[in-house]
Every structure is written in structure tokens, then in C-alpha cells.
Image (spheres, helix red, strand yellow):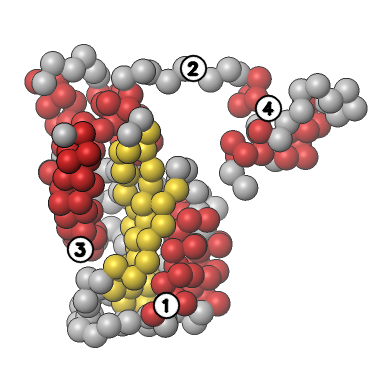
Amino acid sequence: MSVSDRRGMLDRADKGLSIRRQCELLGVARSGVYRLQKPANDNDLAVMRRIDELFTAWPFLGSRRITAMLKAEGETINRKRVQRLMRQMGIAALGPKPNTSKPAPSHKIHPYLLRNMTIDRPNQVWAADITYLPIGRGFLYLVAVIDWASRAVLSWRLSNTMDTSFCVAALEDALARHGRPEIFNTDQGSQFTSAAFTGALAAAGIKISMDGRGRWMDNVFIERLWRSLKHEDIVCCGSQASA
């Protein structure tokens, strides 16, 4: 259960349990309960949609370049806001740098197993990644599991939060439909380093591999999928629907 879900279980009218005690029982910080959240900028969704379009076309762009491009288009925006929105979208520039995806501090990071490996048959190596999808007046997150040798999409799931459950559901669906791979490779995002996700892999007898320093090229395969999906399917369909 997510933190926001647990916060929603708080009963401020309960006279028997104080807010302090309810927070202790639910495992949430009181600071997030007492402090009122700032209302979202009405323009955030439009800016996020444009950031996604720029990033999909040029996945090597970082926050500085995207900020400059948005300003050139007449948008009044600073880099801090672009960085915040990119974090919310779960995207980072595709480039040779360490620690692109930040794991949860308590999660175990597994070693990278694919160095110098020839991947030439189905079910040898699978991989997963998450992308951001703008839809209507909001957005969703999409996770996909692919086979490296064939580039086939084995399963996918949508979610309105960046939690772990939809990633585990996609993994379990792929295993049920296509057997199991020898190795499963992901980045070091907290969804993939979580006990639920790695536990499902370990229970199926699958070796776990995670991208490390200097392994930015591994994301290129699934970035091509995201680009094709957004340019050829989602964007086209959206344009036809609004025409």
C-alpha cells in the first residue's frame, strides 16, 4: 500500500486515537499529514506533455537543454521546475553517467551479468523499463517486459503511480505466458530493486542483473520501443481523435 493510500486512512474525527498515534500505526510521517500540500500548477500537465514530446524525440536531452528549448518556445520556466517535472515523470537524460536511476537506500543492488555476453536466443535475457504517458488531462506510467533477442513485448501494465505492484503484475503475466528467462535485467529504479520484484524473480529461479556504471547503452533497446509507441501509436491516435 502506498504512502498516499495510508494517509487516506487517517480519521481526523476519531477522538479515541490521536493523529500522532494513527501516523505511528500506519507508518506515515506526521509532517506530511499536518503540512498542506501546495496546489498543482495549472500549467504543469501541458508542460509535462511538451517535455515528454521533446524527450521522446531526443532522449539524450537533460534538464538544461529542455529548459532552454521551452524558453525558446515562449514558456516562462526555470530549470528547477523542469527538474521537478522530470522527476515526477520518471525520466532522465540517456547518456554515459553513473546512477541515472536512484534506488531506495535499503534495497539490494544486484551485479550486472550481461557484460561481453552474446544474446542470440529467446528467453535468454528479458528486460523491463518504465515510461511516462500523457493522456487527456492527466498522465499514466507504462511498464513493459521485453525479450532482448527478439525485441518482442512480452507483457505490459499501466498505473497512475510509480509503485511496485504494476511492475510485479507485468512480470507475473510475462512468466505465465512465455515461461521464464535465464536472466532478467533492469535499471536500479526502486520499483525493480524492491523485495517484491526481486523476490518474484528469485522464486522463479531467474538470475537478476541490474545496470551499473557505464551501462547506459542497455536502455537504448527499450527507448526505441518507447519512441515508436509514442510517435507512431499514441501521438498519431491522439491527433486523429482531436481532428
Q: Is residue 86 left or right of residue 40?
A: left
Looking at this view, name the residue that lies furthest to the bottom.
Answer: 121
Residue at 32% across, 38% down: 135
Q: From this viewpoint, is residue 207 visible? A: no
For the residues labelled 3 and 2, the Cα–Cα distance comes to 38 Å
Front: mark 4 or 2: 2
Callout 1: few (<14), some (14-19), or many (20+) C-alpha neighbours within 10 Å?
A: few
**Which structural element holds mark 4?**
loop
Callout 2: few (<14), some (14-19), or many (20+) C-alpha neighbours within 10 Å?
A: few
**Which structural element holds mark 2?**
loop
Disc number placed over residue 177 in the picture, else none? 1
Q: Quadrant of the C terminus?
A: top left
Q: Nearer the viewer, residue 168 or 202?
A: 168
Residue at 71% across, 35% down: 9
Which residue is labeled 4 in the image?
30
Which residue is labeled 2 in the image?
38
CB atoms of marks 3 and 2 within 8 Å:
no
For the residues labelled 1 and 2, the Cα–Cα distance comes to 44 Å
Callout 4: few (<14), some (14-19), or many (20+) C-alpha neighbours within 10 Å?
A: some
For the residues labelled 4 and 2, the Cα–Cα distance comes to 17 Å
Total marks in image: 4
Q: Position of residue 26 (x, y in %)?
A: 73, 40
Q: Is residue 63 left or right of residue 179?
A: left
Which residue is labeled 3 in the image?
221
Callout 3: few (<14), some (14-19), or many (20+) C-alpha neighbours within 10 Å?
A: few
